Amino acid sequence: MAVTSPSPNTSDKKHWWLTNRKIVEKYIKDARAMIATQEHGEIASALNLLDAALAISPRQDKALELKARSLLFLRRFKEVADMLQDYIPSLKMTSEDSASFSSDNSSQQFSREGVKLLSSSSELPCRDQSFKCFSVSDLKKRVMAGLFKNCDGEGQWRYLVLGKACCHLGLMEDAMVLLQTGKRIAGDAFRRESICWSDDSFFLSALTFSGHANNPTPSTPPKTPLTEFEGITQLLSHIKLLLRRRTAALAALDAGLYSEAIRHFSKIVEGRRSVPQGFLAECYMLRASSYRSAGRIAESIADCNRTLALDPSCIQALDTRASLLETIRCLPDCLHDLEHLKLLYNSILRDRKLPGPAWKRHNVRYREIPGKLCTLTTKIQELKRRVASGETNNVDYYPLIGLSRGCSRSELERAHLLLCLRHKPDKAFNFIDRCELADERDLESVKERAKMSALLLYRLLQKGYTSIMATIMDDEAAEKQRKKAAAALQAAQAAESSRLESNLNVSEQVGGNRNNCSVENKPTIVSSSIANSSVFQGVFCRDIAAVGNMLSQAGFNNPIPVKYEALSC
């Protein structure tokens, strides 16, 4: 029988996995050395080596960990979330569980999943198994399992790295659950390992808590693990503080205490410590809703502008700003926002998914988009008819500035000054200083969007000030004219009364002269009541006396006695 000789490629195929493993280990070793320099250029080069290693062995845990930590160091948080999105709690929950989400349930869920990351109790080394001989087949199984291991059976670094990335992306609830789970799993692993350690080696093994063992001497205490642990603790406390404030603000908003809700949201967005971009955009949107409920339209529009500067695809911000502009009858700007919203809906239906990555949160569901698009199309057609009919110059600026009709000039000037100080275009992007952007390359675009939207609002406020001031000046001119006419009428009435008074004085003088002529040679008795009588009574009495005197002179009858004359007066 002829014996077939092995082909020259048989040995290569037999040991291909050993060769690839050596290459992967070399790449990881070189990448680790580059990462230790803590320089951005070296870490970027290390990422290329890690990608090459993962192309050979996609499930190599050390390469995955180094890549995730390198991306986190370079502040490429979106790539970390895309890389480890299977571990984000909100994505793993079903639609039924999403309605009743709570941090306690999520923590329990992740605690059960985290136990899988640790080796079982049966696999822990015992004292009797200190010296054990492994067979070749057993060793082969372990090696193959190491090459094709499942990512769910690895260490806790995924929870810690992904928790930090989620925090920087604004997924605060997910970040809290991940960081708490990572801390708990790391603590459990450390306690398990510390059981078998002596007092001399206990301090040395503390480095294994965070997976950065560098073989230090017992006399030099390590600082890196403690610093990382303290950083995680401080990050968790900051996350919990932000969540408590947002919860209090939402409770006040639901209870109708709009000023209280605005105060809590202002503490978040105006705090000293920076807030992640996604969480800040969400808080600005919620504060805009609070301002809208409180009737402060200008502040609500300004918060919508900031939300859209941070997240241009925010559907709720576009819808809210369009509704506010329609409220004050600013139809062209409202129509512009609705057209933008329509384009966004069309892109969602075209791509068959909501904008952004899978882990991004939205206030609308995909199945609601078709109905919203139909309603939006009808509304756009109606607004176009109103604009075509000429309904563009009757903007109601009073609610925009926050004044009631018939306000005074001082009230308008005070409200306009406050609004100009708050919404000046040069200060429109100052809020970015308190924002932690997910990608620093977006800084200029965010500033540009914030400045442009603030400029449009500022121009609208200036138009409102000019329009209301013109109305107030017209009212003041009309009031001045009315007062002038009233003063002229009063002067005419005064002149007429003075003329009548002068005529009465003249008639009084004439009647007095007649009375003196008729009773010149006759004694008269004047009492105090006659001296105090009115002018008309005096004229009447003197006329009676004159008539009596004339009758006596004519001899018609006997003259009237003087005492009766006095009594008649």
Image: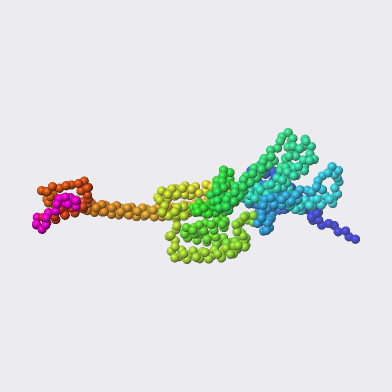
Q: Using the image, determine if residue 352 lies above or below residue 175.
A: below
State left or right for residue 57 relative to residue 289: right
In the displayed image of the protein, which residue is found farthest to the right? 1
For image coordinates 73% across by 48% down, the residue present is 155
Q: Quadrant of the N terminus?
A: bottom right
Whole-percent x, y for residue 103 in the image:
67, 50
State left or right for residue 272 relative to residue 518: right
Whole-percent x, y for residue 459 in the image:
45, 53
- Whether residue 478 is visible to the viewer of this picture, yes or no, is yes
Q: Using the image, determine if residue 181 lies above or below residue 223.
A: below
- Whether residue 502 is visible to the viewer of this picture, yes or no, is no
Q: Nearer the viewer, residue 61 or 208?
A: 208
Residue 101 forms part of the magenta stretch: no
Whole-percent x, y for residue 95 in the image:
67, 58
Residue 559 forms part of the magenta stretch: yes
For image coordinates 24% across by 54% down, the residue present is 496
Q: Which residues are magenta?
A: 553-569
State left or right for residue 1 relative to residue 489: right
For image coordinates 20% across by 48% down, the residue present is 530
Q: Using the image, determine if residue 492 lies above or below residue 40.
A: below
Whole-percent x, y for residue 131 in the image:
85, 43
Tally of numbered discs: 0
Q: Which quadrant of the view contains residue 238? A: top right
Q: How is the image coloured?
A: rainbow
Q: Nearer the viewer, residue 4 or 25?
A: 25
Q: Using the image, determine if residue 235 lies above or below residue 568.
A: above
For image coordinates 21% across by 53% down, the residue present is 536
In the displayed image of the protein, which residue is found farthest to the top? 219
